[in-house]
Image (spheres, helix red, strand yellow):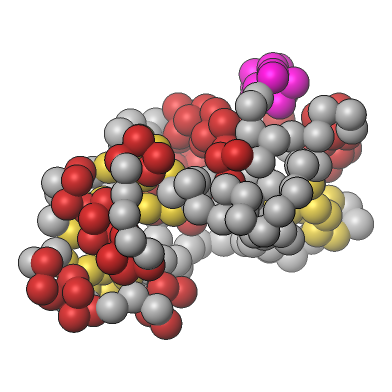
Amino acid sequence: MRVGVIQSNYLPWRGYFDFISQVDLFVFHDDLQYTKGDWRNRNRIKTQEGLRWLTVPVHYRQVAQKIDETGLDRAKPWAHEHLNRLEGAYLRAPFFLRYRDELESLLRADYESISTLNISLVRWVMTQLGLSTPLCHSRQLGLVGAKTERLIDLLRKVGGTTYLSGPSAQSYLDLKAFQAAGIALEYKTYDYLPYPQLWGPFEGAVTVLDLLFNHGPASREYLFSRSPNVQIV
């Protein structure tokens, strides 16, 4: 069984969903330290003025704070602001109106943490893209250890035989530990076709909403990497 493990992100890019599509089980690894200025609570949209951030305000109090313990700052009208920015950027997109009302309901709902918000949105996007990969939360697994040891523990507990990793993990994963555990290791490739979008030259490093708003049900045609994953172990 191929397993993928990533922290939840706010309205992530299409590569995140391509990654989910390639595994038999996807684990949200959110009982880890929250990192400021990261993808946990923000992403980018493409506008007439260029790329702009959508950032969800959160209560960040201590370095040891976990992602799934990081609450939203309800004193700020962030959902209203994000919806206005999305409408300003994508009202002319062919499929914006198809998704607007459902997305508005999701953004305005009450969430315990940035993690629950992110996961709710990821599940919704998966439905729009026709993805049915089973999802799991790392906190449910009672994991021990750190870094590679923690991943091996996770994979054993869910019955994983292959671990699909993002390419940036090459700098810290212990390959010998995977070999000793008898678990295959693959690195994901992110090699995508550009797609027609609004506002000038193509920009790929944006939220998956950009793809959905521009291509609707045909978004899957642009979802999958053109290059195979790299098998390491």
Q: Residue 104 location, x and y as percent? A: 73, 22
Magenta span main SS: helix
In the rendered image, residue 104 lying in the magenta stretch gets the answer: yes
- Could you say which is closer to the camera, residue 228 or residue 63? 63
Task: Tell me where residue 200 appears, x and y as whole percent.
Answer: 79, 60
Residue beneath the point at 74% across and 34% down: 72
Give the quadrant of the C terminus: bottom left
Relative height, residue 16 to residue 77 (above, below): below
- For this view, does 82 lie left or right of residue 208? right
Q: Is residue 159 visible?
A: yes
User: In the figure, is residue 188 to the left or right of 199?
Assistant: left
Q: Is residue 49 in the magenta section?
A: no
Q: Can you give x and y, in whole percent of width and height, for residue 111 in the image?
A: 65, 25
Q: In this view of the protein, which residue sits in the foreground, 47 or 68?
A: 68
- The residue positioned 49% from the left and 46% from the top of the image is 30
Residue bounds of the magenta highlight: 98-110
Q: Whole-percent x and y of residue 45?
A: 75, 50
On the rendered structure, is 172 left or right of 123?
Answer: left
Residue drawn at x 50%, y 53% is 32
